[in-house]
Image: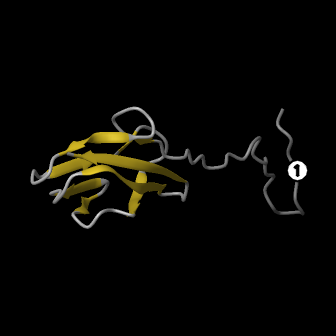
Amino acid sequence: MADSFIPGPGLPACTPPLSAALPVCSPPRIYVTGPPPHSIIRGQTGVPYVYQFIDAGGAPIASWTFSGLPGWLTEVADGRLAGTPVAAAPVVTFDVTATTSCGSTQTITASIVVY
């Protein structure tokens, strides 16, 4: 029998919940092609470039934030970058942060090789 208590006269008896579940908010897991340190497919000078970051699990992504992008590369949609490299670069690095609807975050450093 569940624990219960009886309040004052005229009030109904109540059964407290057996457990109180807290919402679970799994951190995002950013998926990037290539081996660590998260090398992204190669870009080619003068050829339009598009890359879509995806979440490989966790709570749904509410926002993507990019910092340190080169001038030719911009975010065009949630987690998608596009642009046309203007010059070769051995490695272009930038930070990618995914934030879930409940505030969990993951930040990675990604890189692009432009030839």
Which residue does the image show at 72% across and 47% down from the upper left? 20
Secondary structure category for the residue under label 1: loop
Structure colour scheme: secondary structure
Q: Is residue 68 left or right of residue 106?
A: left
- Quadrant (top left, top right, bottom left, bottom right) of the N terminus: top right
The residue most toward the bottom is 71
Q: Is residue 89 left or right of residue 35?
A: left
Q: How many marks?
A: 1
Residue 10 image point, x, y percent: 83, 63
Residue placed under numbered mark 1 in the picture: 5
Which residue does the image show at 55% across and 54% down from the upper left? 104
Nearer to us in this view, 102 or 91: 91
Nearer to us in this view, 17 or 5: 17
Q: Quadrant of residue 62?
A: bottom left
Q: Is residue 34 left or right of residue 104?
A: left
Residue 15 image point, x, y percent: 78, 47
Assess disc 1: are there few (<14), some (14-19) or many (≥20) residues with their C-alpha within 10 Å of its C-alpha.
few
Up-down: is 22 above or below 39?
below
Which residue does the image show at 61% across and 49% down from the upper left? 23
Residue 83 image point, x, y percent: 18, 58
Nearer to us in this view, 59 or 97: 97
- Quadrant (top left, top right, bottom left, bottom right) of the C terminus: top left
Residue 107 image point, x, y percent: 50, 52
Which residue does the image show at 33% across and 35% down from the upper left? 33
Q: Amino acid at mark 1?
A: Phe
Q: Is residue 106 left or right of residue 96?
A: right
